Image (spheres, rainbow, N blue to C red):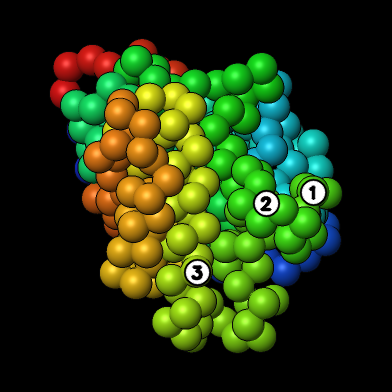
Amino acid sequence: MAAGLVDERGQVQLARKVPTPATAEAEVLFAAVVELVDSVRSAGGSGADAPVVCGIGCGGPIDSSGLVSPLNIPAWRSFPLRDRLEEHTGLPTALDNDAKALALGEGWRGAAVGVPDYLAMVVSTGVGGGIVLDGRLLDGASGNAGHIGHMIVVPDGRGCACGGRGCLEAEASGLALAAITGMAPEAAPLDVRQRTGRLVGLAVASVVNLLDLGLAVVAGSVALGFGSAFFDAAGAELAERSRISYAAGARIVPAALGAQAPLVGAAAVGWQAAGHAVIGGDR
């Protein structure tokens, strides 16, 4: 879990993070969030620099009423995260999927600045994504558009927490890699890193072929930690699978915001809700 103070230019002024508590109790988890948020607010931001809005990026699924049910945090099922944080902070509060938040952040201050059509995704503990089309972040019927982690990349593959089989998240996420290899993702051998990249490239190819995109921005501890072995394999797979004329030349690049991407993305959710143009407007 991370919290921070991010100004209207997308600059992180203060950031703190703590491990997500291993608990099945929803209130224990929320208490840890509150403690982290309070520690950030007490450490900085007063007077003219006091926070004016709270933005949240959370693993999905989410729904438009502010309830969250992140697959990798079973303690929260239909948990009213937005309303509870708004009540606690006293600030207008906006919530979105963490990967959709990343898409906003990378379009605001990262690798997709000035690009009207792109995919952003996170390959970390789980796998998520967000899509910007014609300069607008897509929401979908329930707010979960772009969830690339549940595209099928291995027919009849491993079971996924969503209930399906062969999802990208079930094959390429940090949790999946630990289960497959029996070791922490950062210790994965070269062939596992390359396979992970190829699977991500396969999924990205389907998205760019479908939506006429030229750019995929990838963040997350697995992708960025695997480095060139991952990105070279992903790029090669994308090139092999995207042969139709409008998708040829599509690129996969690392997120430019690095470790700050989640906080800048969450801030972008908040600033956008407050009427600040984060993408599709003046920068």
Above or below residue 107? Residue 18 is: below
Mark yes or no: residue 116 visible. Answer: yes
Residue 171 placed where, x, y %? 63, 62
Q: Quadrant of the C terminus?
A: top left
**Which residue does the numbered mark 3 point to in the structure image?**
195
Q: Closer to us: mark 3 or mark 1?
A: 3
| Quadrant in the picture for residue 68 | top right
Between disc 3 and disc 1, whose residue precedes?
Answer: 1
- Mark 1, Cα crowd under 10 Å, few <14 / some 14-19 / many 20+, is some
Secondary element at tag 3: helix
Between 230 and 84, the one nearer to me in the picture: 230
Mark 2 and mark 3 lie on one chain; the one further toward the N terminus is 2
Q: Disc 1 versus disc 2: distance between alpha carbons?
A: 7 Å
The residue pinned by badge 2 equals 167
The reply to whether the C-beta atoms of the residues labelled 2 and 3 are less than 8 Å apart is: no
Q: Quadrant of residue 19?
A: bottom right
Determine whether 151 is above or below 50 in the image.
below
Amino acid carrying label 3: it is Arg
Label at residue 164: 1
Residue type marked 2? Cys
Query: In front here: 245 or 219?
Result: 245
Could you tell me how far apart the alpha carbons at marks 3 and 1 are, in whole angstroms? 20 Å
Q: Position of residue 140 (x, y in %)?
A: 60, 20
In contact (CB < 8 Å): disc 1 and disc 2: yes
Residue lying at 56% horizontally and 42% vertically, measured from the top left: 148
Element under disc 1:
loop
